Amino acid sequence: MIATNRRLLLPLLLIVLGAFTGCLPQEPYESCGFPPTQKDQCVIASDDSPEIVQIKKANNCVIKQPQCPDGYCVSVQGQSGFCSEVCLKDDDCPEDGVCKEFALDCVKNEDGTTTCLKLCVKKGAL
């Protein structure tokens, strides 16, 4: 009985792991979602007034999103969210990406300088 359970455990474990890894984006800059309240603030909707569209285009939003491999979902200039990763320079970014500083997510250092989160953004999003 125990041997039968062990033989069933490995295939079951592989199925469970495969189900979870299948949910994670595999491509750079794959789409990701924002919660409704943040989506309303960040992503342009078809019924937005021209004034709201301009405000959303000026905003760059970042949220923590477990769907994304590095955990960041980004909306740039009002576009739909996409997965991003932390970077220091453009060369750290995949496929036609640039390293962009997000001034809304900064910390003040002890020496008085400020360090802001830098994330990869696809060039077409800028």
Image (cartoon, rainbow, N blue to C red):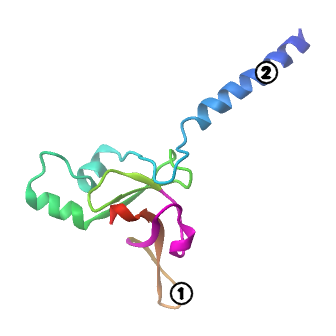
Q: Which numbered marker is on residue 71?
A: none
Residue 60, percent from left and from top: 32, 64
Residue 70 coordinates in the image, percent (x, y)? 55, 55
Mark 1 nearby-residue class (10 Å; few <14, some 14–19, many ≥20): few
Q: Is residue 84 left or right of residue 46?
A: right
**Magenta part of the protein: which range?**
84-103
Q: Secondary structure at mark 2?
A: helix
What amino acid is labelled 1 in the image? Glu
Taking depth in this image into account, of 108 and 104 the one nearest to the observer is 104
Residue situated furthest bottom in the rendering: 111
Q: Position of residue 14 (x, y in %)?
A: 72, 28
Left or right position of 77 against 98: left
Residue 29 lies in magenta, yes or no?
no
- Using residue 53 as the reference point, say whether residue 67 is left or right of it: right
How far apart are the two marked residues, 2 and 1, measured between alpha carbons?
52 Å
Residue at point 16%, 58% (across, down): 53
Locate residue 106: give its quadrant.
Answer: bottom left
| Towards the viewer: 37 or 51 | 51
**As displayed, is residue 4 above or below residue 80?**
above
Q: Residue at x 22, y 60 (%)?
A: 56
Q: Secondary structure at mark 1?
A: loop
Q: Which residue is mark 2?
A: 9
Q: Is residue 58 left or right of residue 117?
A: left
Give the numbered dot on residue 110: 1
Which of disc 1 and disc 2 is earlier in sequence?
2
Which residue appears farthest toward the top when viewing the image? 1
